[in-house]
Amino acid sequence: MQKDRPDIGEYLIRKIAGQGARHVFGIPGDYILNFYSRLEKSPLQVINTCDEQGAGFAADAYARLHGLGVVCVTWNAGGLKVLNPVAGAYAEESPLLVIAGAPGWQERQKYPLLHHKAKEYDDQARMFEHVTVASAVIREPSEAYRDIDRVLSAIVSHKRPGYIELPRDMVNVVPDIETPHPTQEIPGHENRLPDGVAGKVVDAINASERPVILAGVEIARYNLERALQSIADKANIPVVSTFLGKSAVDEKSPNFLGVYAGIVGDDAIRRYVESSDCIILLGVLMTDVNMGANTAVLDPDKMIVLAGDHCSIGQKSYPVPGLQLLPEISGKEFIVHDRSAAPAPVRERTPAFSPSDAKLTTAGLFLALNSFVDEKTVLIADVGDAALISLDITIPAPGGFLCPVYYSSLGFSVPACLGVQAARPDLRPLVLCGDGAFQMTGMEISTAGRYRMNPVVIVLNNSGFGTERPMIDGVFNDVSAWRYHRIPEIIGCGKGFLIKTEKDLAEALKEAQASQELSLLEVILDPYDISPQLRRLCERFAKGARHQE
Amino acid sequence: MQKDRPDIGEYLIRKIAGQGARHVFGIPGDYILNFYSRLEKSPLQVINTCDEQGAGFAADAYARLHGLGVVCVTWNAGGLKVLNPVAGAYAEESPLLVIAGAPGWQERQKYPLLHHKAKEYDDQARMFEHVTVASAVIREPSEAYRDIDRVLSAIVSHKRPGYIELPRDMVNVVPDIETPHPTQEIPGHENRLPDGVAGKVVDAINASERPVILAGVEIARYNLERALQSIADKANIPVVSTFLGKSAVDEKSPNFLGVYAGIVGDDAIRRYVESSDCIILLGVLMTDVNMGANTAVLDPDKMIVLAGDHCSIGQKSYPVPGLQLLPEISGKEFIVHDRSAAPAPVRERTPAFSPSDAKLTTAGLFLALNSFVDEKTVLIADVGDAALISLDITIPAPGGFLCPVYYSSLGFSVPACLGVQAARPDLRPLVLCGDGAFQMTGMEISTAGRYRMNPVVIVLNNSGFGTERPMIDGVFNDVSAWRYHRIPEIIGCGKGFLIKTEKDLAEALKEAQASQELSLLEVILDPYDISPQLRRLCERFAKGARHQE
């Protein structure tokens, strides 16, 4: 192998490392085994999960914190298991690369029925087209470098997953061409921004009386926190975030009020946002959950929308990726607005946790966690009340909150902590996970132990799917009874805690924080004790679930 | 709702029950919640698994034993998780119905971004087309009955999975048409069989000197055991099975020699089959693993092939679904052949297990299990050495062996035992599962406990992916160290055993057999102790895995 003309496997590894990724998540299988043995000799560290599903979620979380995540799996029997995590990464704009092994081209010709095959040899690649922004099946060695560059560039530009299928007879092939020039830009992102739109945005803000900034998840994806904060400071505008965008902006900033989520969220914030004459949506995904289960009442005439792929002021759209204007806008002059009518930030209205001997409730859990999270914490919430309890917790660390609020696949949180701790070893994951979600992927906590990670994992044991009970209840909402706090005995590391009272929780959190090992806190909750946020969400969603009954 | 004109949900339930299915596997979610509440009031019993992946495998196993299995999941965040099990069901011809919820048609119009959505609302349906034989998205109520009939009919005729997407605003709609006539036949299966082909098959058999029957999995799927046995008895022909077809024919029959699997299987059988002048392949899938990792040396000129979708004698093909000829053929006259040159059946060459204090090896495990399985046992083997150790175990119960030999997705076996015990409560599952596979789906053993099932689950703890070590080894083949035998303490039922010696195993099996509860046997094996079958398979597959190195 020539030093400046690497084989395809080596080229792929170099390009991944060139994007700053240091880890790859996955499970080997024979169609990807030779690439795994290459990974082992590379600067990239492999993290083997229990199941491919867990690897998908872990790599997604890594991508959200680190700018590129990689999951590497075998053909079909591995690849199809990550379609769901990859769909979630697509929905929530996470730059995730899927590397899937596959049978070699020669053996496909020779044998019609190789193991792991369902219908056709190209089915896996075609299925991934539905959940990725770019894909490539490596076939012509002369095109391999360019294909790899194209997929990686699309991932990083669009903050969406991409797919590279690497048939095993391609890994060690050295293409007979020069390496291409540095990664070409994706068309559309080289476009010059039209003059004047930034000025129009500033004019609209300056002409308003009571503007408010609604910060979305794309602010985090495109690293625009500073530009946003600069506008908010100069123009003295209050900032709220969406639920999915939670922690995209500094929640300790004096401008920051809390999360806006229609009737699901804080009512003072809802009233303030919905009565504003200029709602500035920055990088917001207008999804049902983000919009408070579609209860948001936002007047389009009063909206300025700057997003990754569109831009509008009131009813007028501009053909420009709006968020790219943000740095320019942040350099402009602003009128200093009066924000005295804004409600006090949620963090100032939340009392400190003073634990009693009382049975723990979701209300007490919220207060305890709000006191516990610090600037070293990444709070990872699973779907359900784990998410909703987190809605009003103040996150001191920018980027310190992770939750699949939009795609809402259960089972995200425990595997996600693997990605978080690999990407940011300076931070510590605090996982909040319902019992139903934990039974899907929670045994990945053993992977944390294997790699000497020390997350604090809280399992909300309310004996079932608490989110569904208020919609339509039935025994199908129950889950098996596990003794979660004893799992450390099975996996041979960490410590478990059984928590029934507020004081139990306070003591366990204190001990967990001091420990170098992982901790698993099983919190016993009444099956029908749900947070007020979840109750409001469920009341709204129940209409859909009971449709036409 | 009129009694003879059911709404769509009710019609679907009636049709499933009409096929004899009594159980549905799955996990609810809001887009399928109203159908779940209908299931609860129906004669069908819901079995809730820990994860949708487990439900997919369980329903597949149920289908293999019962003629129709059903998995019911929510949209995308549930549905995409079962694509891998459904691909396996497609590959191995299992009649599995997927019912997936989805957003209602009206809400899709109203909201562009509902939770669980990735790109487009129809993506899930399009992805399932790659792993199903028929699919329907219920849209026009007037076509719903027919769509449901069409998909169910295709599943049952072709023994392949089908997909029905049930948007939640369709569940309670009563179509404004009469119910259709009884399920129409699938075209191609009404075809009259051409005269004379059966006679040609008989002539070819009668003209041969040393014929042998190779029985495949389709014999089990199409319930043709009796016709096959009748031919074997009348013509006095030895019978061997493929690995995937293991237990499709009676393994205690005097004709039955054992499993043919090229160089991977028993050598005396290999020599006998490959030197036969008339190899009668009945319902055989010619996959790589079935053909002994493509080492089978079978002369096409000497083959008679009768399969679900083709028919040939030597090099000549006939346009007829060959297996449909089998009942007719079995009624014909046959010359009585001499089978004295056949090797003794494997079962007669296998010594009884006489346990010692010696450390347990794969060789000892094979002997122990061969003595243990009885006519009440269904042996369910996961992929890897769990499968290969099982290859030569004699299965007394027809249909008593289950293993995804072709598709080879790890993690099949533990969830499959749920399907087996629901379908056949008169039989008891014996699960053989590697540690790597167990970490993927093994916690579904808690589901067995929840529904008071009592499988005997054996975990082969050899500290990693033993199938891959002989191909290419690396730390990526290790798995986390779990104390599997203590899992009953976590799930609150059953008993665990830690097994190091042959006597440990004998005692544990005895106790497990006597118990009404589930048992989990953790068997400690050396990481490099693999069965001779697996060694031969790996040596062959290693060439592919190391391709071009």
Image (spheres, coloured by chain):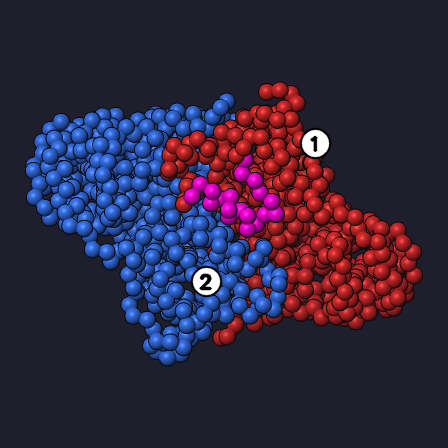
Chain colours: A blue, B red
Q: Nearer the viewer, residue A487 or A383?
A: A383
Q: Are marks 2 and 1 in contact (CB under 8 Å)?
A: no
- The residue carrying mark 1 is B181
- The residue carrying mark 2 is A137
| Residue A416 location (% of width, % of height) | 38, 48
Pointer 2 chain: A
Eye-nearest disc, 2 or 1: 1
Number of residues whose C-alpha sits closer than 10 Å to that of mark 2, classed few (under 14), some (14–19) or many (20 or more): some
Which amino acid type is shown beneath numbered disc 1? His
Task: Specify whether A150 is left or right of A226.
Answer: right
* Tag of residue B479: none
Tag 1's secondary structure? loop
| Residue B266 location (% of width, % of height) | 73, 66
| Residue B475 location (% of width, % of height) | 46, 64
Tag 2's secondary structure? strand
Magenta residues, start to end? B120-138
Which amino acid type is shown beneath numbered disc 2? Val
| Residue B345 location (% of width, % of height) | 80, 61
Picture residue at 41% right of the left edge, 45% below the top: B119
The answer to whether residue A330 is seen in the rendering is: yes
Task: Specify whether B253 is left or right of B509.
Answer: right
Q: Is residue A439 above or below residue B387?
A: above
